[in-house]
Amino acid sequence: MPEGPSIVLLKEAAISFSGKEILSVEGNSKIDMHRFPGKRVESIQSWGKQFLIVCDDFIIRIHFLLFGSYRINERKEQPPRLSLQFENGELNFYACSVKILEGRPEDLFDPEGDVMNDQWNPEKAKSKLEQTPNAEICDALLEQDIFAGVGNIIKNEVLYRVQVHPESLVGKIPPAKLDEIIYEARNYSFQFLEWKRNFELKKHWLCHNQKTCRRCELPFSRKHTGTKNRRSFICVKCQELYV
């Protein structure tokens, strides 16, 4: 599943379609695609893991789920979920969720909740965390209402950096350590963006899909954690469990 930084890269790659008219549309999505031709794209935006094509009175929202993908000015062999043609090229989306949202992005999406947004508000994130003291931090970091854009890779890398066990309870984590987690959620996301841009993300992974802790030289414990049941990589020696 693409995480927030990858959606920012898509936004950058698709920015040339901002201001352009949608000439034609096709795809196997069940939405009302007849609304699209003749519409001009006001802006290309992202919010967390969601890619937004903003028109005057609605938004085309793309979520890539687990296996979604896209192509710009080229196509895959499989039928697209949605294909938009412009005078300067085309956008093609595959195996993803496509929805039409009515209204304006500023009314539907809170920029203070998106870790990649300039308006990100860490104090709001901390306030929301404090309202869920019994949640495991591995689940809390994946809550898009709190950390829009954070996915499983970022979750794993952040918790390893700050040396917190993913099954720690939010309410038991010391406030200073919670602040560190919130800071790293954004900090690592921007490092992820630059590494992804330079095609070198995987070589910077410290725990995700790794076998051995670099600090302790012990094998990582691999298990699915939390109610979200996502895979975690844990050093039981240096990642403290707060319960």
Image (tube, helix red, strand yellow):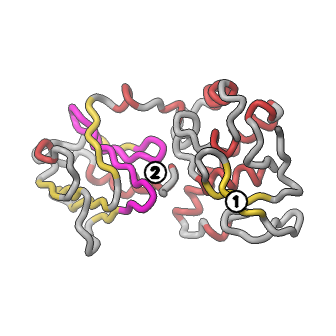
User: With respect to residue 140, does 209 lie above or below?
Assistant: below
Residue 18, given in percent of the width and then of the height, sits at 27, 47
Along the line of sight, the residue nearer the viewer: 191 or 232: 232
Q: Is residue 12 visible?
A: yes
Q: In the image, is 166 to the left or to the right of 146?
A: right
Is residue 147 part of the magenta span, yes or no? no
Number of the front mark, 2 or 1: 1
Question: Where are the magenta residues, as a range?
Answer: 46-69
Q: Earlier in the sequence, mark 2 or mark 1?
A: 2
Quadrant of the image containing the C terminus? top right
Residue 70 versus residue 138: which sits nearer the camera? 138
Location of residue 230 in the rendering, given as x and y in whole percent from the top left corner: 61, 54
153 displayed left or right of 92:
right
Q: Quadrant of residue 168?
A: top right
> Residue 113 in the image: x percent, y percent?
53, 33
For the view shown, which residue lies furthest in the bottom direction? 77
Alpha-carbon distance for marks 2 and 1? 30 Å
**Magenta-colored stretch includes residue 57:** yes
- Residue 131 drawn at (x, y percent): 66, 24
Q: The residue under label 1 is which amino acid type?
A: Lys
Name the residue at 67% across, 63% down: 208
Which residue is identified by label 1?
Answer: 223
Q: Mark 2 = which residue?
A: 8
| Residue kind at label 2, given as amino acid type | Val
Decide which of 160, 84 is in the foreground and name it.
160
Q: Is residue 186 visible?
A: no
Q: Is residue 27 above or below residue 75?
A: above
Report crowding for label 1: few under 14, some 14 to 19, many 20 or more residues within 10 A (C-alpha): few
Q: Nearer the viewer, residue 108 or 223?
A: 223
Please tell me which residue is depicted at 59% across the width and 44% down the height of the picture: 142
Q: Secondary structure at mark 1?
A: strand
Say which element carries label 2.
helix
